[in-house]
Image: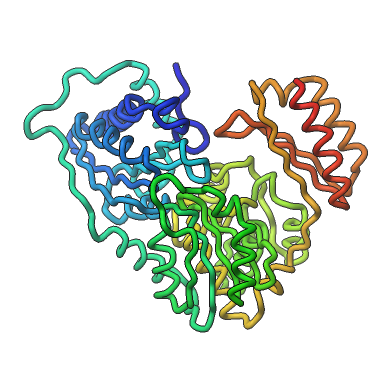
Amino acid sequence: MGRYFGTDGVRGLANGDLTPELALAVAGAAARVLIGHDPTHRPRAVIGRDPRASGEMLEAAVVAGLTSAGADVLRVGVLPTPAVAFLTADFDADLGVVLSASHNPMPDNGVKLFARGGHKLPDGIEAEIEALVDAGPLTGRPTGTAIGRVHDADDAPERYIAHLLAAMPQRLDGLKVVVDCAHGAASHVAPEAYRRAGATVVAVAAEPDGLNINDGVGSTHIESLAKRVVAEGADLGIAHDGDADRCLAVDAGGDIVDGDQILALGALSLRAQGRLRDDTIVATVMSNLGLHHAMRDAGISVLTTAVGDRYVLEALRARGLSLGGEQSGHVIFTDAATTGDGLLTALNVMACVASSGQSLAELASVVRRLPQVLVNVRVADRARACEAPEVKAAVAQAGAELGDDGRILLRPSGTEQLVRVMVEAATHERADEIAHRLAALVAAT
């Protein structure tokens, strides 16, 4: 059986790996699985997308797949991934569909599915969908009144903004923020939400044309935001990615505040409010040792998972915890969201600044980051490269060299043919030397 779902939906080169035919098949199979679980119920799906040009084509295919299988469709237009997750629950839909490749370049796209309530699909449901895709086109299609209908939810942005404002812990009056929207799905709603929360907002990279998403802007290209924050004399900057499920920040001096620091701010804030359940947060193996040290010193436990927000979510739900996230800026506040929400995260970061009277730099300094170098190595077979005996031996040797003053992590990307080589050490020079030494060996395998 083919494996279509990666760690974050079905993703690939739009009209290449990810064809309209595949999108139609996945959508139709998802609707058939839902109907199969409850034949008496006519399912309803919410569908949203980021502004990539290919999203228009893939949305048409997904709508056709869903309606041809007998599901009704509610289109919410261009909105962040977490907005679609929220709206799936808010509209009491059975399925949420997002067309986005997140931080990937414009030519890529993806199909991401949410279950009822806005939660990620269980592995078992994904397996059922994949089996139906492999089984081929639907036979015995519904006809007449059994065909699904399509409606547009014009109030979807307002519903989402109202949800964000209801969840925020503090007004932002007096703060000036520069927000980089990556020419992505949050280009309208993020500046609007932050203004309504009281902040003075300077919006950049907020003019999507279908082709410029993530193009030198956003959370993966944060340098220009840092310069703009300093030039504007702003209190901070916020950087989103193309679908706004992540958030990184920049302090007033132009220094980057990463997901580990944002996670620490959130943990300390929630605990001060008595809302950090079990005094425990969830992070991934990519989180800097500095986060672990800061949380240890504060008496907060850190539960570590594999890389991927789905694993963070699984741990949060299994333990009933309040907060988890990744260094990349995926942060999940479970009391207000079912997935990582960059806008909700940004509002919480700004609220920490507004309520404390401290600068973002002062707040973020609680995490003293160990120098960390990450090198992405493009390979033909990511799994084979990681398992090569010569690579394993080199990693073991380098780990012995570092001892207790650092660590090494090799992991295959969940979405691309890349191996990510991460090294932490006492100095940047040491981490860089070891990371590039290992990366050269991985590239040669």
Which quarter of the rendered picture does the N terminus lie within? top left
Q: In the figure, 406 relative to 228: above or below?
A: above
Where is 250 relative to 18, above or below? below
Q: Nearer the viewer, residue 348 or 324?
A: 348
96 or 216: nearer the viewer: 216
Q: How many marks?
A: 0
Coordinates of residue 327 in the picture (x, y in percent): 65, 52
Left or right placement of residue 380 versus residue 78 in this view: right
Is residue 325 in view? no
Residue 51 coordinates in the image, percent (x, y): 38, 48
Q: In which quadrant of the rendered view does residue 189 lie?
A: bottom left
Q: Residue at x 31, y 42 (%)?
A: 95
Vertical comparison of 234 with 305: above or below: below
Q: Quadrant of residue 25?
A: top left
Q: Position of residue 394 (x, y in %)?
A: 85, 28
Decide if residue 237 is on the left or right side of residue 55. right
Q: Is residue 433 left or right of residue 418?
A: right
Q: In the figure, 375 relative to 222: above or below?
A: above
In this view of the protein, can residue 71 be seen by the observer?
Answer: yes
Residue located at (55% from left, 34% from top): 415
Indicate how the structure is coloured in the image.
Answer: rainbow
Closest to the observer: 431 or 404? 431
Residue at 80 percent of width and 39 percent of height: 435
Q: Residue furthest left?
A: 144
Image location of residue 387, percent across then percent down:
73, 23
Which image quarter holds the C terminus? top right
